[in-house]
Amino acid sequence: MKVYKAKLKTGTDVNCFSIVLGAAVETKLSKFAEETERPVFFANQEKRIIYSVAMRPNKQIFRKDINGEAGYITFDAEEVEKMQQSYFKSNNKGLAKMSLNHSDEAIKDVYPIESWIVLNPEQDKSKTLLMEDVQAGDLILGFKIDNDDVWENFVKTGEVDGISLEAFLDYEIINPVNMNTEEKKSFINEVIEVAKSLFMLSEKEELEVEPEVEAPADPLAELQTLYDAAMAENADLKEKIATLQAKDIEDDAELETMKAEKAKAENDLAVFKAEKLAIQNLPSSKDFPKMTALEKYRESKKNQ
């Protein structure tokens, strides 16, 4: 399965984040309300504030349709920072919005109040907010929710548990064979997990697999073989192209020779015709038939 590096499409901005159930980053909302046990400064007063990890650099996120096929996308740290700035740029222009579960309809009275990128998880503000599974490079967003329906019927009830990005993206394929060992292991494990979810394999079904069927020693061996075959085919095509180009050069040289020979033949023909005409125009003389070829030629020159 292919892995793509995702980038914000040129000429566009991030103008929407969505409050969703099952966010791609897989971290839960940190919410503050009077009935929850949270830091002292949020106690006894419902603040209606939520914080969530919105983006995580280098995390591979499964998508069912990338250029017409299933695959993974990932954002590097630079792109995460770029998207954070793009979102607040849109918000400053009044173009940013929030939605529920990526619906087309924007929700009102939900707006960003804070954002930062985690530098040191152990000393980060997320620790004070009791957020779990925060990593270096994570983009955290904080939103104020003044919408009663969203707060009462979605956040408090657990119908939503994270923040998800909406943006127009461009994709650049990343070749899995270039991954280091740890990245390969992570990639293989995620492929296995996705396969389980797609085919809905239960633990019982996994146990019923025939014992004599052995898994390959290296799950990427087949992929490496295909890659090597493609490289060999590419080299063969390059050699054929070079041969054709050399043949073209040879044909061009032969064509030029033929053109030169044709020009010489045409010139020789013109000389012959001129001489023939001169001879035909010579005055009749009974001595002329007795002349030698050289004498005839000289005689013809005199009459020109």
Image: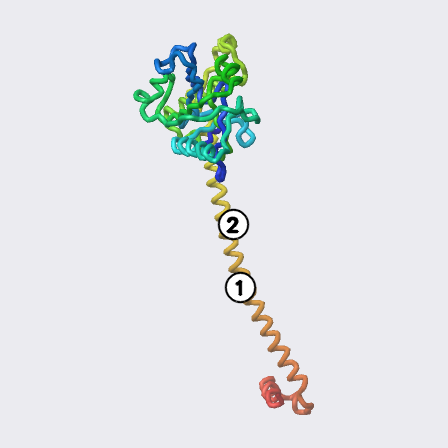
Q: Are marks 1 and 2 in contact (CB under 8 Å)?
A: no
Inter-mark Cα distance, 1 to 2: 20 Å
Place of residue 159 in the rendered image (x, y in percent of width and height, measured from the top left): 51, 15
**Crowding near the residue tagged with mark 1, few <14, some 14–19, many ≥20 C-alpha atoms within 10 Å:** few
Place of residue 75 in the rendered image (x, y in percent of width and height, measured from the top left): 43, 30
Q: From the viewer's side, name the closer residue of 68 and 78.
A: 78
Q: Which mark is residue 137?
A: none
Place of residue 132 in the rendered image (x, y in percent of width and height, measured from the top left): 38, 16
Determine whether, in the image, residue 222 is placed left or right of residue 122.
Answer: right
Q: Is residue 255 above or below residue 41?
A: below
Quadrant position of residue 285: bottom right
Q: How is the image coloured?
A: rainbow
Q: From the viewer's side, name the closer residue of 269 and 29.
A: 29
Q: From the viewer's side, name the closer residue of 199 and 169.
A: 169
Residue at the extreme left:
123
Q: Residue at x 54, y 28 (%)?
A: 65
Q: Secondary structure at mark 2?
A: helix
What amino acid is found at the position of numbered circle 2 in the picture? Leu
Q: Which residue is mark 1?
A: 257
Q: Residue at x 39, y 11 (%)?
A: 44
Q: Secondary structure at mark 1?
A: helix
Quadrant position of residue 102: top right
Q: Which residue is mark 2?
A: 244
Residue at the extreme front:
45
